[in-house]
Image: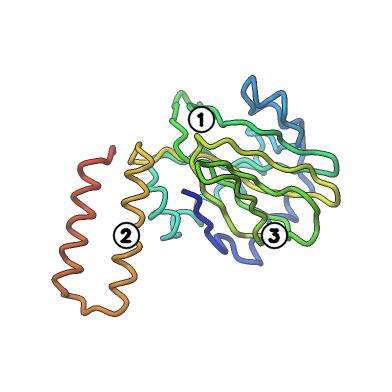
Amino acid sequence: MLIHIPELLNPEQVVAMRGHLSGGEWADGGVTAGFQSGRVKDNLQIGSDSALGRELGLVVIRALETSNAFISAALPRHVFPPLFNRYDAGMGFGTHIDNAVRQVPGTGQRMRTDLSATLFLSDPETYDGGELVIEDTYGSHAVKPAAGDMVLYPARSLHRVEPITRGSRVAAFFWVQSMVKAGEHREMLYDLDQSIQALSMTAAPNDPAIIRLSALYHNLLREWGEV
């Protein structure tokens, strides 16, 4: 399930974040890659030990905490501290799959990567190439949304970043361990939640059908969720 979340960050936040990142210390992005992905990865990253990266990552985390769309789609249990990358002309990231387990920097905590997320920070008209291409059973999906928009997709998906031919592409990226491990269960809960929200816009607050659907949602979450 590929979820597009528009305007996770507002334009003012995006401009401020890009300004801070322009003065950051960028290094080889291969440090966060696994064996296979490291061989096809060519980009720059702000180090995970960077004070700037941690500060900007908290801005992203706060936005996630108030995003109903993210919470509905991800049902997050753990969120990996956001990292920041940059692709300049000639750079790209070949087809790969994200590591199944990651250790949170500076802690002994490990988390399962159920979902991958990319938060785009560059306006799409300022660079050519750089599309995030995600493969699933229905084919390949190329996405290049507006700055401030986020894309959430299963971490088990093969994906790539097309080479940049003009300009630079800056983004935040991170992983999510969901309370609901099975992707098909998350998708059913997401569809049910979205239906409840849509019906609630026109139904009375005490509509019996809405109450029954809400009870079904929460009982399924009790059945499938880990906390």
Where residue 52 is drawn, which disc sits there?
none
Mark 1 or mark 2, earlier in chain: 1
| Left-right relation of 89 to 46 | right
Which residue is at a point 27% across and 41% down the rendered structure image?
225
Tag in front: 1 or 2? 2
Q: Residue lying farthest left?
A: 208
Please state which amino acid type lies under the numbered disc 3: Ala
Q: Position of residue 191 (x, y in %)?
A: 35, 57
Q: CA distance from mark 2 to mark 3?
A: 33 Å
Q: CA distance from mark 3 to mark 1?
A: 26 Å
Which residue is at a point 41% across and 52% down the rendered structure image?
73
Please state which amino acid type lies under the numbered disc 1: Val
Which residue is at a point 22% across and 53% down the rendered structure image?
218
Q: Which residue is mark 1?
A: 104
Tag in front: 2 or 3? 2
| Left-right relation of 117 to 219 | right
